[in-house]
Amino acid sequence: MTVIDSDYPATAGSLIDNFHHLRTEHMSMSNGWIAGIALSCVFQVGCVSKVAQPNQYSGFLPNYEGLQEQTTPSEQKVLRWTAPGFDPHAYSTVVFEQVELYPAPKPSERVNLKTLQDVQTAASNSVKSALSPYYTIVSKVPRAPADSRTLILQAAITHVSANNEGMHWYEAVPIAAIVGATQAATGHRDQTAELYLEADLVDARTGLPVAKVVRKVFGETVKNASQPIVANDFKVAFKDMTNDMQALLSGQ
């Protein structure tokens, strides 16, 4: 008599059923693995912060305490602090020379010295355009009218770069997400030009700060990680920044 172990598949049908079970289990594991990669890609590539993070502060401002995220009239996110009771209309003069580059600029193949200088000029012009309808602008404190209440504005561009664009909703499926992440890793994904601007506003008489801002400025989209960044990439962004400053100063 031949004894057949009850745990061993004894028929062709049982063998086929077992094969299908293993195949289904393998496919389920594969799908889970792909979905896991997709979600990981979405979280790593898709989350683009709209404001500067603490580890991105340059040290240009005396301190970064009290900064709170706010939305500007142009729907941009900024970090801002204002001293209690500060009234911009109580002042008539602002001491401002130009936006600085801080720390000392380090040009690269992608962001050359001319681009940094052009961006510096464009940002300075944006600030002056925003201030000029409301204040007399002078370059040094001694040049302020003797009877005026004066503010001192110090501002700096602290970083210029481009980062991978966040994924679009239609890319948040397994295969598209994996492809998108691969493009980002290999430098072929679209990128957004961006710069960081920090500003400090001080009452010239008391020497006390009355406002400070850290703004992440988003420029145009560049094709990939090898395309140079130019000042014109921020033209629209600087216009929005000017309008936001004017709206704030006018009390809108």
Image (cartoon, rainbow, N blue to C red):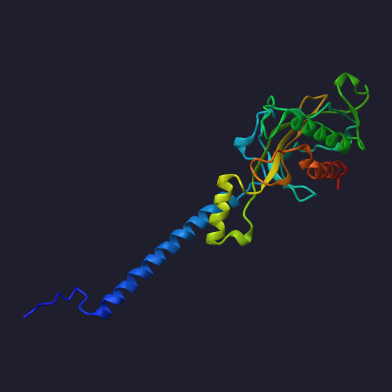
Residue projecting furthest to the left: 1
| Percent x, y of residue 134 | 91, 37
The image quarter containing residue 247 is top right
Residue at 38%, 70% in the rendered image: 24
Horizontal relation, residue 4 to residue 78: left or right: left
Residue at 68%, 35% in the rendered image: 110
Name above or below for residue 160 compared with residue 21.
Answer: above
In this view, the residue in front, 85 or 78, is: 78
Q: Which image quadrant: the N terminus?
A: bottom left
| Percent x, y of residue 8 | 19, 73
| Percent x, y of residue 25 | 36, 68
Is residue 171 visible in the rendered image? The answer is yes
| Percent x, y of residue 21 | 33, 72
Horizontal relation, residue 84 to residue 17: left or right: right
Residue at 71%, 31% in the rendered image: 112
In this view, the residue in front, 77 or 15, is: 15
